Image (cartoon, helix red, strand yellow):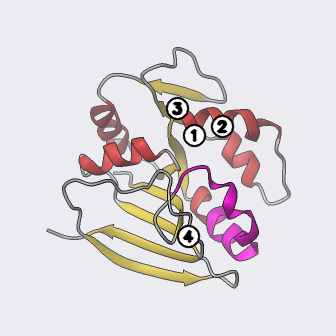
Amino acid sequence: MRKIIAAEYLTLDGVMENPAWTGPYFNDELAQLQHSLLMASDALLLGRVTYEGFAAAWPGVTDENGFAERMNGLPKFVASRTLTTADWNASIIQGDVAAEVTRLKQEPGQNLLIYGSGQLAEHLRQHHLIDEYRLMVHPLLLGSGQRLFREGDGTNLTLTNTVATSTGVLVLTYQLAST
């Protein structure tokens, strides 16, 4: 069974919206962690907004370490109520997103990786489908903006790893707590 991993850039006050603010904190340490995570995944789960931003930017990107090639080559599953077509190796999930993601989890393979996609991540959290959160917490307070975790029923998590980068980003890995 595949694991669903949500990899999210956050500010210290929990904002994830429009992560252009991450630039000054990105370094080789964070790049290597992201590279390892992407290489351990064989598909992306994305919300429409994240998909549209990525699909506009990534197809023209190349690099020496294979990250862009992997990003561009992976199948993408896009949860959307409004898209009718998709390119960039993407399929649209319409209807019961939780049921379709449950089906995808049951297929053999590597991780299913979520980048950004706050509404999708929250929907999947409510259905207890996210197995791991990789939270990259940046030493920055924005005060307002979309947050990853919304009000509602709680989810118990267990901290399984921490990494502190030289730019002050804390990479916190949490898994669902055993019940």
Secondary structure of the residue carrying numbered label 3? helix
Q: Nearer the viewer, residue 137 or 58?
A: 137
Tell me, for residue 141, which label it has, or none.
4
In front: mark 2 or mark 4? 4
Q: Nearer the viewer, mark 4 or mark 3?
A: 4
Q: Label 2 crowding class (10 Å Cα cut-off): few <14, some 14-19, many 20+?
A: few
Looking at the image, which residue is at 55% across and 70% down? 141
- Label for residue 48? 3
- Quadrant where the image shows the C terminus: bottom left
Residue at the image point whose x is 59% and y is 22% from the top: 86
Residue linked to disc 2: 53
Q: Is residue 6 left or right of residue 66?
A: left
Q: Mark 2–mark 4 contact, CB under 8 Å?
A: no
Element assignment for label 4: loop
Marks 1 and 3 sit apart, C-alpha to C-alpha, by 6 Å
The image shows residue 95 at horizontal and vertical percentages of 32, 22
N-term mark: 3 or 2: 3
Give the amino acid type for the residue marked by disc 1 in the picture: Thr
Q: What amino acid is found at the position of numbered circle 4 in the picture? A: Leu
The answer to whether one can see residue 75 in this image is no
- Magenta-tinted stretch: 16-35
